[in-house]
Amino acid sequence: MIRAQRSIFSRLVAAAIILSLVLLAGLWWLAREAVSATLQDAAAAEVDVDIAGLADIYASGGEAELAARIADRLALIPMDGSASHYLLVDADGKVIAGDLAAMPPLDPATSQSGVIALDRESHAFARAVQLAPGLSLVVARRTALEAPVLSSLALVFTAGGTVFVALVALLGKLAARRLERRIDQINLAFREPQGAATLMAAGTAPSDEIDELAAHSAAALARVNDLLAAYKDTSEQLAHEIRTPLSHLDNRLVKALAERPEPRIAERLAEARGEIRRIVQTLESLLDIAASKANRGDSSGLAPVDLSALVTGMCELYAGSAEEAGLELRWNVAPDVGIVGDVRQLSRLVTNMLDNALKYVPAGGRIAVTLEPGPVLVIADDGPGIAPQDRARIFDRFYRGRGRGEETSGSGLGLALAQAIAERHGLVLSLEEGDAGAVAGATARDMGGAVFRIAPAS
């Protein structure tokens, strides 16, 4: 199913992966610091042991012996790859022995220690001690193990972290997909309540929050379906109960007219028959509005409709009536414009809009109909237009606008029904301003009257 936005489950998996990477980076930093501190402590311990041995040599053999032993140690290359550096200076800073070029910034009097720079790229842990007045010794140790150990640690973290993140992504995706399927079941139930809700209601007892939500959704949809069924049955029964006596009454009026009563009485009987037809028409319109609103968003029962052929047929059908009323009806219909819908309701929509235009446009006026891909249906006229006080209520049920200062006849349900049918098909019926655009070769401003536009909801 195509979604207009990213799934929340994909965002959760992405958040889990990012969190895993952050945790791995934090663990790598802690491990690196711990390894560096451990190696530095080891170097410090070795420096202290070396200083203690050299101090013993100085105590037993003097300065010359100490210098000779320092030279011997510098000549040795340790097997572990580490190396020691020495400096023996007198009170004037003169180098007596060692490989360090100068006295580092360490105080021998306090046996100060710290990390010193051997060159631009390497550092070592060093300690300076005062062996005797005017004689100072510096011992520094550079461990060659730190770089390999940290490299190995980085390799382990990279490989292990990759596997860990991959497992998090895989398990998160599997869990998200399972949750997504369960949420899709609930969404399916709301899109097609007749099938999915029954299936969900027949499931097992709730075991977690999603199952509980599914159970509540199924119960709510079942109640809605029951209410809709009861509403439909009641409406159909009510319509039948009203139509039946009205039909009997109409038949009696027909029989009464067949007996050729006085002209005045015949006129009253004909008016009564007209009122009966108006009541039946109003009832049917109300039922159609209710059915269209109840089925809004439900695609069941809809089929592809050639809207171009439908609009063209309706315009041809109304052309004669428009000519008899002294009106000019013209249309501009793009070919092959289709829509998925109910052909009977769409026909009712177009006829209601044309009836509305014929009712309000005075003799000598023009009505223009255009249909463009989208579909976008525009019906414009050069009649008196919609009064400002009527614009906000023209789509209300039973509201009848005023034409040329007089209230028009009718039930006031034509535009309300047209709007309900449009919404049933995912369309919006709106009253446009007078300069809404081109209409059948003339602009809406040229038409100067009402402009109704039916287009997909944005």
Image (cartoon, rainbow, N blue to C red):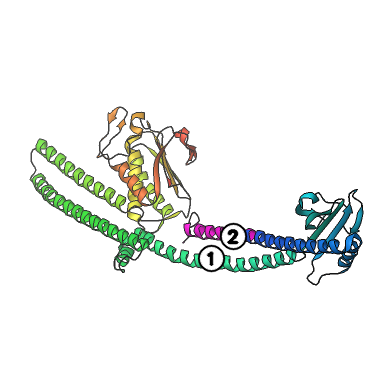
For the point 15% across and 49% down, which residue is it? Answer: 242
The residue to which callout 2 is attached is 21
Asked if marks 2 and 1 touch (Cβ < 8 Å), the reply is no
Exactly how many numbered labels are in the figure?
2
Residue type at numbered disc 2: Leu
The span from disc 2 to disc 1 (Cα, nearest Å) is: 10 Å
**Residue 214 location (% of width, % of height):** 34, 61
The residue to which callout 1 is attached is 168
For the point 71% across and 66% down, which residue is it? Answer: 149
Magenta region includes residue 7: yes
Stretch in magenta: 1-29
Q: What secondary structure predominates along the stretch shown in magenta? A: helix
Residue type at numbered disc 1: Val
- As drawn, is 216 to the left or to the right of 11? left
- As drawn, is 437 to the left or to the right of 237? right
**Residue 450 location (% of width, % of height):** 40, 35
Q: What element carries label 1?
A: helix
**Residue 102 location (% of width, % of height):** 87, 52
* Residue 342 vertical placement versus 165 (above, below): above
Residue 312 or 256: which is nearer the viewer?
312
Quarter location, residue 121: bottom right
**Residue 8 location (% of width, % of height):** 47, 57
